[in-house]
Image (tube, helix red, strand yellow):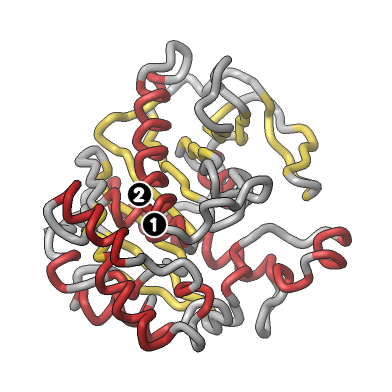
């Protein structure tokens, strides 16, 4: 498998006249790249140029982490675009850097995968883009809360009762996950809507998923994961200072029993998968700049190779689901 770029990275932002949410895409192009900035971080892309002419191309639907934005993993999106993938990233309503009113709450856990499905629907119906998408090769990738989002798209029945039960015992030691744990009223509403305490948002179009430091493993159960059959890659941080490993990545590994590939990235913390820090971010949001023994550029290069290798093996049929 060659790792050499075949294309330049095309880029378009806010694709629709009336966005339901901001949505950016990166895609294979042939025109030269020019300098761009995403949330103050310098990069390069070919803005608003035509797609390369030898598609259709696989598409990777991307879900950002809690309180993040659609550019959180632009570095990975550009890398994949240069190697023949479309990457599409909606900015989640009520759980982004401008509006975190629903962050880490049951409402957003239900809404996020629906937004991903809507974004895919819009792209597959877009007059200038649809013909460039290979409908048989639709994948999903997410970081943190986005990792949980893509797992739900793959068929994970998120068990809100398990989340509630965990937080009844661990509210003080795991405030990130337990700050907005479901109440009994929430559980009753899920029973009324779904016949059980689960949030199920399966999308059969998703052919494989990549979950980077996925959150909300406390809501994962044997039954909830039993119907997930697509190829899965989990990317773990060597030192996740935000999410407790034993109830997140390690818990998913235990329940999946060899049904997914797990890769631990040395020197990485939870936020090592975000872009390089600008001086402004370092001064005002220093916690986003913590890495643990490796430069962030090196961490990103590892993730690029791991993700691209997995997608290429899925695309070729070398890796298949159950």
Q: Residue at x 54, y 80 (%)?
A: 240
Q: Where is residue 60 shown, x and y percent of the image?
A: 41, 42
Q: Residue at x 38, y 60 (%)?
A: 148
Q: Residue at x 37, y 48 (%)?
A: 140
Foreground pick, 265 / 174: 174
**Residue denoted by label 2:** 110
Question: Is residue 111 left or right of 73 when viewed as pictured?
Answer: left
Q: Is residue 118 above or below residue 211?
A: above
Q: Specify whether residue 91 is in view.
A: yes
Q: Specify whether residue 258 is in view.
A: no
Which residue lies most toward the top here? 127
On residue 92, the disc is: none
> Quick check: marks 2 and 1 in contact, CB under 8 Å?
yes
Classify residue 37 by image quadrant: top right
Q: Residues within 10 Å of mark 2 (few under 14, many from 20)?
A: some
Question: Is residue 246 left or right of 28 when viewed as pictured?
Answer: left
**Residue denoted by label 1:** 106
Q: Where is residue 86 shown, x and y percent of the image?
A: 47, 35
Q: Residue at x 36, y 58 (%)?
A: 310
């Amino acid at each position: 498998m060659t790792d050499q770029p075949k294309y330049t990275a095309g880029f378009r932002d806010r694709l629709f006249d009336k966005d339901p949410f901001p949505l950016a895409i990166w895609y294979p192009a042939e025109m030269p790249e020019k300098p761009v900035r995403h949330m103050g971080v310098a990069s390069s892309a070919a803005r608003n140029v035509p797609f390369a002419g030898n598609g259709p191309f696989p598409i990777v639907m991307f879900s950002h982490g809690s309180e993040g934005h659609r550019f959180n993993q632009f570095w990975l999106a550009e890398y994949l675009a240069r190697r023949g993938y479309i990457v599409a990233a909606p900015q989640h309503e009520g759980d982004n850097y401008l509006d975190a009113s629903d962050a880490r709450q049951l409402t957003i856990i239900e809404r996020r995968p629906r937004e991903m499905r809507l974004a895919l629907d819009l792209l597959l119906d877009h007059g200038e883009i649809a013909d460039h998408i290979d409908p048989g090769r639709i994948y999903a990738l997410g970081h943190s809360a986005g990792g949980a989002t893509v797992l739900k798209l793959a068929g994970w029945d998120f068990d809100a009762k398990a989340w509630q039960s965990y937080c009844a015992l661990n509210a003080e030691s795991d405030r990130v996950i337990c700050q907005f744990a479901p109440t009994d009223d929430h559980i009753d509403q899920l029973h009324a809507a779904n016949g059980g305490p689960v949030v199920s948002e399966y999308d059969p179009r998703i052919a494989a998923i990549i979950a980077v430091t996925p959150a909300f493993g406390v809501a994962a159960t044997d039954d909830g994961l039993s119907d997930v059959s697509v190829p899965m890659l989990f990317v773990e941080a060597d030192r996740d200072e935000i999410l407790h490993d034993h109830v997140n990545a390690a818990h998913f590994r235990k329940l999946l029993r060899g049904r997914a590939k797990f890769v631990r990235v040395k020197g990485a913390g939870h936020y090592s998968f975000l872009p390089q820090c600008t001086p402004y971010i370092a001064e005002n949001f220093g916690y986003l700049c913590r890495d643990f023994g490796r430069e962030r550029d090196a961490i990103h290069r590892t993730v690029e190779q791991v993700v691209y290798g997995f997608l290429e093996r899925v695309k070729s049929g070398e890796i298949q689901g159950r």
